[in-house]
Image (spheres, helix red, strand yellow):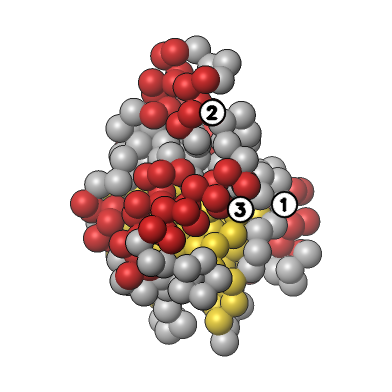
Amino acid sequence: MLRVFTLYSGSSANCTVIDIDGRVILVDAGGGIRKTQKALESVGLSLSAVEAVFVTHEHSDHVAGLSTICKHFRIPIISNDATLDAISRENGDIDQSLFCPMPSGACARRDCFEVTSFHSSHDSAECVGYRIKTAHGDVGVCTDAGEVTPEIRTSLCGCKTVVLESNHDKNMLFTGPYPYRLKQRISGPFGHLSNEQCAELLSTLVSRGAENVLLAHLSKDNNTPETALSTVGSFLSVHDIKVGSDVNISVAPRSEISHIYTYN
């Protein structure tokens, strides 16, 4: 059985769970140990079942929980050298013996799954997304990107389940209270994907086999779940893709467990 869901998703904390026949990996660990353990226990899992944390990049909303979680459960921390170096500099108490370098574009294999990273366009040391290959279908995770690069598109094509950033509504962002420089950073090529950029990419991914989507990393101030779903749904409809029949789409909540996509 394969289960894919987020424990929390947004500017405060991010963590995606891939449960493959009881073998669990996390993509990022931005929440504290108690919050993460409680969330996992609510779906019959535990941090003791986690085999590795694959880190996308070093920003605190993706790594804040690493130090305590990995200290108490001795979980390997996997990412590229640049990201691991940045984590080490910004988290002095983290146990570097748990670091497992994996160059961007490389693949980590276990008997029932394999994880491949790909470059993502974001203002960090070396941000990546991940594609997880399983017997129940592939899972793609891309939660921080300023633009949809050819590498991102190629890496996510063919994934059955996709956790994809839909960070902001452009109108809400540019008419909102953020300083101009921050607005430029968010909307720039190393910032975050808008609802429209997410929708455009999804039109390709659905045509290439995506069945289930979690819209992730929604901005608290520049987006709403309703806006993201409406924008994505409207764009897909224009391209003759019907939400609910051709693809299932839900929003990953900021501080609660998302819908759990399950495959037997």
Amino acid of disc 2:
Met
Residue indicated by mark 3: 252
Relative image position of residue 141 (x, y in whole percent): 44, 57
Residue plotted at (70% across, 46% down): 255
Q: Looking at the rendering, which quadrant does residue 73 occupy? A: bottom right
* Quarter that holds the C terminus: bottom right
- Read off the residue under disc 2: 172
Quarter of the figure with residue 13: top right
Q: Which mark is residue 206?
A: none
Residue 138 % position (x, y): 40, 73
Q: Is 102 rendered above or below residue 174?
A: below
Q: Is tag 1's residue or tag 2's residue first in the polypeptide sequence?
A: 2
The amino acid type of the residue labelled 3 equals Ala
Residue displayed at 41% across by 53% down: 235
The residue at the far left in this view is: 150
Mark 2 and mark 3 in contact (Cβ < 8 Å)?
Answer: no
- The mark nearer the N terminus, 3 or 2, is 2
- Secondary structure, mark 3, is loop
